[in-house]
Image (cartoon, grey):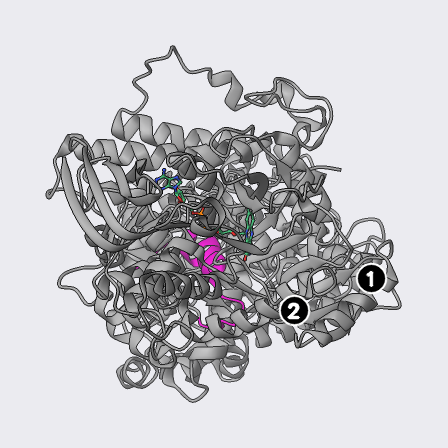
Amino acid sequence: MSDADRFSETDRSSDASDPVSVFPDAESMDLRPGADDCYKCSTCDSVCPVAAVDDDFPGPKFQGPEQWRLERHDDREIDPSVSACSNCMRCDDACPSEVPLSQMHNTARAAYVEGNVPRLSRTYLRNRLLSNYGRLAWLGSKLPRLTNFVMGLSVTGWINEHVLGITSEREFPTFATETFRAWWRRRGGAQVENANKRVAYFHGDYANYNTPAVAKALVRVYEHFGYEVVVPPQRCSGTPMFANGMLGDARRAARFNVETLADLVADGCAVICSCTSCSMALRQEYPELFDFERTELVAANTYDALEYLRINEDLESALEGTETDAFAGLAYHAPCHARNQGLDGQALEVLESVEGVDAEDVGDSCSGISGTYGWKRERYETSMAIGEEMFRHMARADADAGLTECPTCAMQMHHGTGYEIHHPLEVLEAALSTPDGR
Amino acid sequence: MERSTTDVLVLGGGSTGCGIARDLALRGLEVTLVERGNLTHGTTGRMHGLLHSGGRYAVSDRASARECIAENRILREIAGHCVEQTGGLFVKRPEDPDDYFEQKLRGCRDCGIPAEVLSGTEARALEPYLAPDVERAIRVPDGAVDPFRLCVANAMDAEAHGARIETHAEVVDLLREGEEVTGVRVRHDSGPGKRTHLRPGTTEEITADYVVNATGAWAGNVAALADLEVAVRPSKGVMTIMNVRQVDTVINRCRPKGDADIIVPHETTAILGTTDEEVSDPDDYPEERWEVDLVIDQLAELVPILREARTIRSFWGVRPLYEPPGTATVDPTDITRDFFLLDHAERDGVTGIASIVGGKFTTYRAMAEEIADHVCAALGVSARCETAERPLPGSENLESVLERMDAFGLRSPIARRSADRLGSRAPDVLECDGPNPVLCDCEGVTRAEVRDAIAASGTDLNAVRIRTRASMGNCQGGFCCRELAQELHPDHGHEVTMAALADLFTERWKGQRHALWGEQLSQAMLTYALHAATLNRDRADDGPLEFGTFDAGPDRGGETGVPVADGGPEGSGPHGRERTRGGRGGD
Ligand SMILES: Cc1cc2nc3c(=O)[nH]c(=O)nc-3n(C[C@H](O)[C@H](O)[C@H](O)COP(=O)(O)OP(=O)(O)OC[C@H]3O[C@@H](n4cnc5c(N)ncnc54)[C@H](O)[C@@H]3O)c2cc1C
């Protein structure tokens, strides 16, 4: 049983005439019972990519159970080192005792930001800006060419670096000239109607504003299999907000998403995501951090897009005999958040059946960017040091392009190798559109 | 044989002995205290840690209740760094008697104990894990006290005022000349002064103008060395330590009498207790599993989450109960908790000695004051007692300690814990050249603090433990015992270091045995493997290890029960089931 339901159960079992909201929100959530499951084996520390390259980072065991156990009742002081955690969530996956490490990190980070980062500080503004990328992107997408031009200027880089603390080492992602949602409207929405096979697509901000090709690929692949795709209104999944301790922002976004998606789920839709951090947020972080009605319902019905197809379709037969020459050698990196959902093997297994695609797994290292983490000036070096292993393995692979599910891992892969990076759905789309694709 | 002489000789280094030594030293007397183990080796180191508000005695024993609240107030002032002002609740479940609740409330008010009634909802707002059917509660100023820190601070202050404190010095004989006790013969485990493992022992005769026998449950044994009779009725009680604090307030059950009715939040942990069972020998009594089961089961009625929580160890203590000859109470829970000063001159016609028995930790200072008054009277000294006003070392000007912690570059929870433990001594202790890594992760203890403790206690790592809390946390020393022992080097060589390590580790293991069932049992393998792989501590002298007992294996898990090391497969009882990762499961 996760702690989230442990709490809600306590909640429910209390006398109806005597309502006590045990822990009304994540900021005041008591995670000592979760800390209790830790027996100090330190496996989490051994898989932490940040601890591996940064000797000053005390590691997930300290950030999580140790800090919670040491904390005093009246203490709200959280050690600043929590902001050096990249929220890759590998520790969650590694823990043999099901300690809710990332939940602890997320709440600790929120408490830290709440208590220690002044509202007008540069760090706060920068982090708020980064974590509300969707809003920024919305603006950018209104004038994509101008924005891309401005973002590419060296003076913008200087301002970012020196005023905002956003590293100028990285190129800003370019905004698509047409967002996915604009395309969807122009196209007239779903081309397939099927009351028995409906999915709600949670595309997230990045696929909408920056890589609509991935979102379009998803639509085409799903329509190929006879699904009716619904594209509901949605807000950012919250991933960057968790990672920056902006739990208030995350809460608002999550509430909106849960409410819209829950209606669709009740209507028989499964929720599918093309970004593994989005699916992670909906499936794990929402239930761990929020207690809106139907959070669990949405979580239980959310899938990664490829995962859902594998469960419900005979992908192997469908791909038999398909071929594409658009992607020759691909160096595949499994994002940490895919790994945590047990999805790290699936892309390669699926693409095995496609003729002409030769994808190679570059190992289980972390890319190091972890969403907004690698964009911060003070984290850039750490981010690149973590990514080093992946870059090396990508260079050694027999490949000249990369493959991954996560948009920010893709940024890092591109940044470190110069390769063009693709999404498995794009490959699938290409394969299925060959004459032989059934 | 060495010989020495002193004004007053105090036997026993528990709260009573340390309190008396400090009081007399402050009054200007020359004091020597001898203790057979380290400080708090006896009952004081094996108690519940409740700083009574007096609420517990408000119905049955109002004199004790009044004394408790008075001393509670004094200790908050003079021993601030040993006390956590948690507050306490007497909680009433539906089956607990209403009229007792009212009596308790009236009793508290009559004794001057601030008491406030809370509804069930209010009580749960304060302590969210209280059972949903708790109906009402009385809030009182109970607190949590660290007996180790308090005794050490008393001893430290006594030393600062000229006292000689000898630990690992067992009284093997009382020197009696006719109708007068003139001193003792002690055996120093490793010679006088600070302990050094493997150093040969010595004996010493210490003569004194007055001898105070403050050996608690052992007072009868010690008195017998001078053919005096003190009929202590030792009574054991079990306490079980939870890995985390499920409550931040002391929780008492509000019913007339009962075992296992208090939870004390203590440092990083919560301690459940206790029971009351007369034993014949305070050094040799059974530690039984049913006792641990009982406290968990009973207290889970108040705080249900306890059933699923991880325990880190259990320990037993023996109360030095005493009744004047002829009282003959049957049930030990009915024996008074008051203390007795037995003046052997008056009682047995033997001068130069008094024995102290009974009492409570909470009132140790008042007891010490009364005894010190008696000693001064016997020696014809007139000197005022200062212990009610004078803060203990570490408790002076506590307000500013936290503010000064930034200078030491510690991570915030570590700084906070260090400040809590060291109090006003923190800046002196933590100021050091070079890096100051954390040696005990679970309790946040740094090397500087460990070194300070070693300076005071030699190679006795158990004495370091009680001063710092290092190895008292989640892993129970699995990770940090080695780090602590490491600090003895290079002042001490390999053999001494290994002997000190073995002592500490053996002590840690003693209490852990009672916490290993289900998944925790297999998790214990980690510590074993760690010590085997990094220290070769698996050189088995007693046959190969039975690995099977650590884990039932995949076929044996599930609902049906997991064999436990000492009990074999069990089909019933909490041990047989495991529900959560750390917890013991239960029904
Ligand atoms: C289970 C339990 C729970 C308790 N909980 C609480 C509580 O929550 N609050 C509270 O106020 N009180 C509590 N008490 C009571 C309290 O712990 C005791 O009253 C108090 O600690 C007694 O201290 P002491 O110094 O008299 O005895 P001890 O601490 O036993 O000191 C006697 C010392 O004499 C030493 N000694 C024995 N023989 C020799 C010898 N031959 N030579 C040299 N030294 C020797 C022993 O090693 C020992 O250290 C509890 C008691 C028990 C048993």
Q: Whole-Å distance between the Cαs marked 1 and 2?
A: 50 Å
Q: Does B567 sit above or below residue A345?
A: above
Q: Is ligand 1 within 8 Å of the beta carbon of the residue shown at mark 1?
A: no
Q: Where residue A152 sits in the image (x, y, percent)?
A: 33, 78
Which residue is tagged 2? A254
Question: Viewed as shown, does residue A228 lie left or right of B111?
Answer: right
The residue lying at 73 percent from left, 48 percent from top is: B258
Residue that numbered label 1 is attached to = B100
Q: Which span is picked out in magenta?
A: A57-77
Q: Looking at this rendering, what residue extends furthest in the top direction?
A: B543
Is residue B20 visible to us here? yes
Question: Do tags 1 and 2 sit on the same chain?
Answer: no
* Residue at screen point 89% across, 68% down: A17
Q: Is residue A438 visible?
A: no
Check if mark 1's residue and mark 2's residue have beta carbons within 8 Å: no
Residue B514's x, y, as percent?
A: 54, 33
Residue at the limit of the structure toward the bottom, as seen here: A120
Front position in the image: A6 or A223: A6
